[in-house]
Amino acid sequence: MHPHQLEPPHEVFHDPKAGEVARAWISNGGLSLSLHAMAFGKPEIWGHVLAGMAQQVAAACAEMGTGNASDNFAAIRKVLNEDLNKVAAQLSPLANKS
């Protein structure tokens, strides 16, 4: 176990069908992921997962004394949309033409 590793959520210990689908780390200044990409059978389901994660992060930040859940979510959404637009531009067939 890595010294900075988080513990699994307590509710997973009571659900025999629970399964880990993603683990995220910041390493060497960048995002490093270990994930089960097809855990849901269709890639688009990850949109729901990412939205749920944003909601939980916004609420957790509010619980820790940073803003309120609504404002936190709006800030996360703004930056996420900006970053998604950058990635979409990079993945665009037009961006990859030489």
Image (cartoon, rainbow, N blue to C red):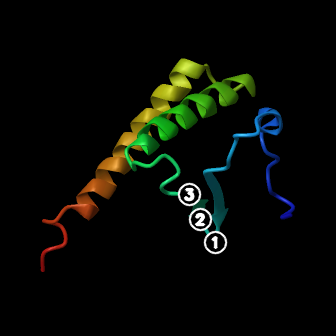
The numbered mark at residue 32 is 2
Quadrant of residue 96 in the image?
bottom left
Say which residue label 3 marks. 36
Note whether 20 is above or below 91 in the view shown: above
- Among the two numbered marks 1 and 3 on one chain, the one whose residue lies closer to the N terminus: 1
Outermost residue on the front side: it is 16
Give how far apart the Cα atoms at labels 1 and 2 are.
9 Å
Note whether 90 is above or below 61 in the view shown: below
The residue mark sitting in front, 3 or 2, is 3
Residue 3 in the image, given as x and y percentages of width and height: 87, 61
Residue 42 in the image, given as x and y percentages of width and height: 39, 48
In the foreground, 2 or 60: 2
The numbered mark at residue 70 is none
Residue appearing at x 67%, y 24% in the figure: 62
Label 3: few (<14), some (14–19) or many (≥20) C-alpha neighbours in 10 Å: few
Say which residue label 1 marks. 28
